[in-house]
Amino acid sequence: MFDSLRVPVIAAPMAGGPSTPELVAAMGRAGAFGYLAGGYLTAASLAEQIATVRRLSDAAFGVNLFVPGIRSIVDLSGYVERVGREAERYGTQAGEPRWDDDGYSAKLDLLVESRVPVVSFTFGVPSDSDVDRLHEVGTTVVVTVTSPEEAREATEVGADALCVQGFEAGGHRSVFHDDPDDPCGGPLYGLLAGLRLCSAVTDLPLVAAGGIVRGADVAAVLTAGAVAAQLGTAFLRADEAGTNAVQRKALDDGGRPTAVTRAFSGRPARGLVNRFLREHTDHAPAAYPQLHRLTKPVRAASGQAGDPEAMSLWAGQTYSLAGGGAADEIVHTLWDEAREALRRATRRFE
Ligand SMILES: Cc1cc2nc3c(=O)[nH]c(=O)nc-3n(C[C@H](O)[C@H](O)[C@H](O)COP(=O)(O)O)c2cc1C
């Protein structure tokens, strides 16, 4: 599937607003590829987004889903109190910290019915039978992995391709099992090390994600054996992205480091360091999506107040080098830069 792309660049799924049908369609029209982010959406809104992509473009596209995890049994009372104080500060009430499966089965049924060209899974592997159902309707199944162990598991379940996510990546780490004793939820592999280690345990095509922001990085991962480069942060400020204005400004301002935290959602994710992240990271239990629901009104109120200090400002390590503009221009620049970088590197081998 990704082998046949005119430009082997993928706009990563980015749940919570940034991924829009307009962004996905623009990627397709540019000869590249885009994902809708099915996480947090109801099946009905995801169906509308799929219909809009199809109205705007004939190109292939993908949809990403979060695989539900096991409900963690942890005492949340201390964290509920902390977030309660944040809610008071922003004049709102904390959300109910309940577990749910994000409407997974309804969304999977929708994707089977809609015959979406590519479906990717994050936070775990789909069941054998779900993979079979997708294959029966001709869908390519991709699983995001962060380690060679996960790559082996995803290969065994019948995935057609893997997206290897390095620790540089913005947003949630795709670890299958969030290890509560590890602040990052599991081992940290940089993108090149992850690609190399995963290619040693699977023959599946690998897509590379994490910190890719320039064409030279696209050339680097293709040279390292990836079939395509998947970029999230590089498209966060694209004209077609639905990224919140306060987050766009924080990205434009630069200057903040990024860090991995469970403070906002209960699962490790990389974002710009702000007050909420600094004050709560060390206290946040591994309890997704309970913390996601608990902090949601606080994050929303912080955004509405134009205050970036209590929002989840997901972004990858190289965010300061990403810019804005139309998605097709970003794609063309990346591809021109990639070709130039490869030409320059090739001279070293002559
Ligand atoms: C704002 C944001 C939201 C994200 N949401 C998702 C998501 O819904 N599903 C997913 O598989 N990955 C998600 N990711 C991770 C991306 O798929 C990808 O791994 C990451 O963006 C790559 O690193 P980069 O941001 O440095 O390019 C998200 C990343 C960001 C920055």
Image (cartoon, helix red, strand yellow):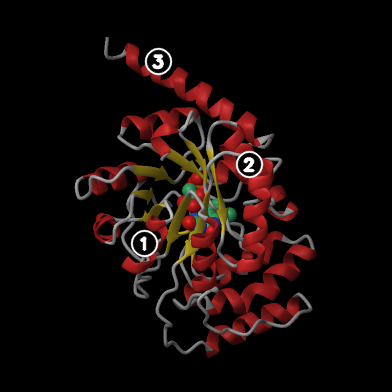
Tell me which residue sits at (33%, 29%) in the image.
223
Tell me which residue sits at (39%, 20%) in the image.
342
Of discs 1 and 3, which sits in the foreground? 1
Pointer 2 local density, CA inside 10 Å: few below 14, some 14–19, many at least 20: many
Q: Amino acid at mark 2?
A: Ala
Task: Name the residue that disc number 2 marks.
Answer: 25
Residue toward you, 348 or 132: 132
Which secondary structure, mark 1?
A: helix
Q: Choose top left, top right, bottom left or bottom right for residue 272.
A: bottom right
Q: Is residue 318 left or right of residue 179?
A: right
How much space separates mark 1 and mark 2, taking CA atoms? Answer: 25 Å
Pointer 1 local density, CA inside 10 Å: few below 14, some 14–19, many at least 20: many
Residue toward you, 15 or 270: 15
- Residue 341 in the image: above or below residue 303: above
Q: Amino acid at mark 3?
A: Arg
Q: Amino acid at mark 1?
A: Val
Q: Choose top left, top right, bottom left or bottom right for residue 137.
A: bottom left
Q: Position of residue 302 (x, y in %)?
A: 73, 67
Which secondary structure, mark 2?
A: helix
Task: Name the residue that disc number 3 marks.
Answer: 344
How much space separates mark 2 and mark 3, taking CA atoms? Answer: 32 Å
Pick out the residue farthest to the left: 200
- Residue 317 in the image: above or below residue 145: above
Task: Name the residue that disc number 1 marks.
Answer: 131
Q: Is residue 157 left or right of residue 47?
A: left
Q: Position of residue 34 (x, y in %)?
A: 55, 44
| Labels 1 & 3 near each other (Cβ < 8 A) | no
Image quarter in which the N terminus is found? top left
| Labels 2 & 3 near each other (Cβ < 8 A) | no
